[in-house]
Amino acid sequence: MGIMDIFRRRTSERPDLSETRSSATGYTSAILAAREQWISGQRGVAELSATVQSCISLWEGALAAADVSGADMLDRRDMAIAARGLALRGEAVFLIDGERLTPCTDWDVATRGGRPRAYRVTVAEAGGSFIETALAGEVLHFRLASDASAPWTGQSPLSRARLTAGLLEAVEEVLSEVYRLAPIGSQVVPFPESPETDMAALGRDFRGRRGRVLLRESVNVAAAGGPAPAQDWRPQGLSPDLERSMTRESLDQARNAVCGVYGVLPALMSDSAQGPLVREAQRHLAGWCLQPMVMQMAEECSEKLGSTVQIDVMRPMQAFDVGGKTRAVGAYIEAMAKAREAGLSPAEVGEALRVVDWHE
């Protein structure tokens, strides 16, 4: 074989010379995507903001406290890792290794008919990492918001709201630069022409003299053909006027939108949030965001682990309102007593409970 045969692409004549390309979720594609975002100006650091991390913490806490039945290897630590992966990347992959799950940092997937068939996963180690190939049945692949064009991948909430995430990043970056570089609290005071050493000494004299009377010479002097400005010793502040730029309103709106993307009611982050509002925000997050997500995770586990897996975040995340729970228990016992007095069978009582979604 000549040296030029190495560079020729003859897949029909020489199968051993055929090129192998990585799939759309591998390390190379991630580097190219990061490079593209850097060139286009989208750095994607909105996930570093406290708003996003607060939402991710709620996801982690909810999934770590969830009730998992039918999958002993899926412990609370793995649930928290899965929650963080779904929140930031939209995906989480675990290698089924005997009686435990091993989280994967990167993976390539081979599909057939739009369904994963095999994986090449990267597992992190303290001194590096190793790559292992596994069939689809040996891997738990949790996905969030999969698209029809690529059902084997997931999308994070921030990737589905790039404009809002970019606005939050830009506003927080501007504010951080203002507080770091702008002369906040500084003032310019008119003073007659003097040597630089005298001006420096005068500036030092003003430091720390709070509440004292400072007497200095006026600037109302006639020199160079005319008097100085009439404002005399009136200082001029150098602090930037952020109110006119509406940075506070823009920051609040961006924060509220990001919270909404993660299923967190923006009112939960309000300073005036009260107990009933906090409880309703918890129920909203659990009922409309996290519970459908963990039900998909349970289906993936049931398919790969060979047992019926159920995951529930509603019970652990319920607000423990003592008064409300007491009234609910009293009403439930009273209803059961009336049902027995009326002679209703357990099946009829169960049918009534199913109507109000109180069945198991």
Image (spheres, rainbow, N blue to C red):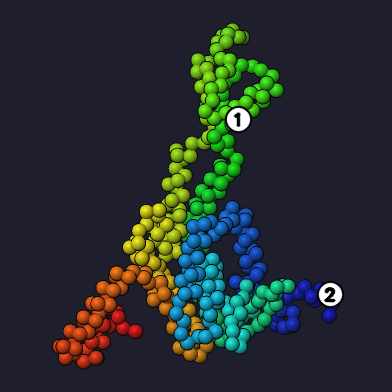
Mark 2: give few (<14), some (14-19) or many (20+) Cα within 10 Å.
few
Residue in front for this viewpoint, 325 or 89:
325
Left or right of residue 187: residue 204: right
Residue 270 rendering spot, x and y as whole percentages: 40, 55
Percent coordinates x, y for residue 299 in the rendering: 46, 83
Residue 314: % across, % down: 39, 75
* Residue that mark 1 sits on: 207
Between tags 1 and 2, which lies in front? 1
Which residue is under mark 2? 3
Give the structural element (helix, strand or loop) at label 1: loop
Q: Residue at x 55, y 12 (%)?
A: 220
At label 1, the amino acid type is: Arg
Q: Is residue 257 above or below residue 81?
A: above
Is 2 left or right of 264, judged from the image as shown? right
Q: CA distance from mark 1 to mark 2?
A: 77 Å
Amino acid under disc 2: Ile
Front one among 69 and 301: 69
Relative vertical location of residue 225 with respect to residue 151 in this rendering, above or below: above
- SS class of the residue under badge 2? helix
Q: Nearer the viewer, residue 315 or 114?
A: 315
Which residue is outermost to the left? 342
Q: Quadrant of the N terminus?
A: bottom right
Image point (55%, 49%), residue name: 173
Residue 109, can we see it? no
